[in-house]
Image (cartoon, rainbow, N blue to C red):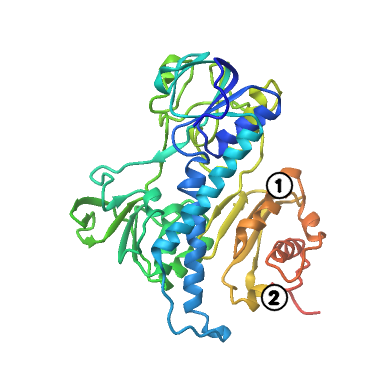
Amino acid sequence: MVMGSLPEQVDVAVIGGGVGGYVAAIRAAELGKNVVLVEKEKLGGHCLNYACIPSKTLIHISDIFYEAQHSEKFGINISSASIDAKKMLDWRLGVSKKLEDGVAFLCKSNGVDVLKGTATFISSNSLQLTDGITLEFKKAIIATGSIPKPLKGFEFGDTIIDYKRALMLDRVPKSMLIIGAGYVAVEIGTLYAKLGTKVTILARSDVLSHFDRDAVELVKRRMSELSVSIIAGVTPIERKGNTVSLSNGSSLDAEIIVVATGLSPYTDGLGLENIKVEVDQNGFIKVDNSLQTLDPNILAIGDVIGEPMLAHKAIRQGVVAGEVASGMNSSYSNIVVPAVIFSDPEIAIAGSIEEAEGVKVTKFPLTGLGRAVALDTTKGFIKIAYEDDGLVKGVEIVSPDANSMIAEAALAIEMGATIEDIADTIHPHPTYSEGIQEVAEAALGRPIHFFYGKPVK
């Protein structure tokens, strides 16, 4: 796929058309640069086609299906409900196709030439493209992303799949074993459990081991209610057919085995050995605050440069890289990258909520929130961490709509807001977002809708 005629030399060449790459290409084009974007599969990359958008689409469908069968408390009685897995997949594929077409339109509208194929560095100023075409460039941006980590003895095949294929099934499997216990495992496990699959998660230590345990315990409790089995402290040893032997001496059978043990940077075939680009011990490309590699002509962004491996980080870095490649004095200097787990309930965090010297943490439960009581979603809370002078250091939200609300916290931290700034800002009622105001009020010692045990006067 080529839009326009491919020039022999360009100002900026972007390798990888995922959310970071196409944003970088468009930003550079907006600044008047001649840009070529090389993508070997689909515009939008893994996020639009295989990961972020598909998973959230299917999570939404599973939520509707589950709630339709469990809403008697609201006076809703549905005698039977069924899921058409093929139609569900068609919808999920249609969403990705719409977004992919939208990215193609944006590239064309901004004058970005899009080439379907691969690119290999020949030198610091040239790339060999598909069919041996050589392209000269002034600046290049590597945005090739990441790929699922394989697990020895559990190579991908018909019944052993990665997260991409787990989101491409045209049926609801009777049973699913997920190896790994990060956010991908939790999201996929929860959505299939709501569709009726018997789900087992193998955790080397525990589910979401790097997250706040208060939040994780609520998620684990909900997964238990959904009959998701979590086996902690074990590792898979070997597989024979659909039977997996575990390190504790037991074994499990599953129709589908999902390997979700992390991601690796995708740099295969890039020809990094032909340029002055350095990688770390895990293969991630090293960059500075301007996203510049050791090679003065080459930048890198997104998953390929390491944690946090999140689409919204790549998008922001795409903007910065597009500007730097166009000669602007921009830098990636964001204080915080918010993170969201689309579990049940959702977990969203911006900054740090760890107590430390000079840092306090206050917690507000959703039981004090009118909307949560009305919708029977009181199993959650909001935490805020702040310094002695009130400066906000972090916010954690465990609640429906946490994905939307966390943006307020990220903005507050970036702007150097205080808990008083948040408490004095009018939040609409009745909403979950009021909880952020409530926790700030509580941190100031003036709580309204939750009693923290102070004497009655």
**Residue 304 versus residue 209 in the image, above or below:** above
Residue 236: % across, % down = 26, 52
Disc 2 crowd, CA 10 A, few/some/many (<14, 14-19, 20+): some
Residue 359 appears in view: no
Occupied quadrant, residue 345: bottom right
Task: Determine the secondary structure under disc 1.
Answer: helix
In this orientation, which residue lies closer to the viewer: 90 or 25? Answer: 90
Occupied quadrant, residue 241: bottom left
Q: Amino acid at mark 2?
A: Gly
The residue at 53%/35% (across/down) is 302
In this orientation, which residue lies closer to the viewer: 80 or 56? Answer: 80
Residue 194: % across, % down = 43, 69
In this orientation, which residue lies closer to the viewer: 438 or 104? Answer: 104
User: Rounded to the nearest whole Å, what is the CA distance between mark 1 and mark 2?
Assistant: 27 Å
The residue at 58%/26% (across/down) is 4
Mark 1 or mark 2, which has the lower sequence index? Answer: 2
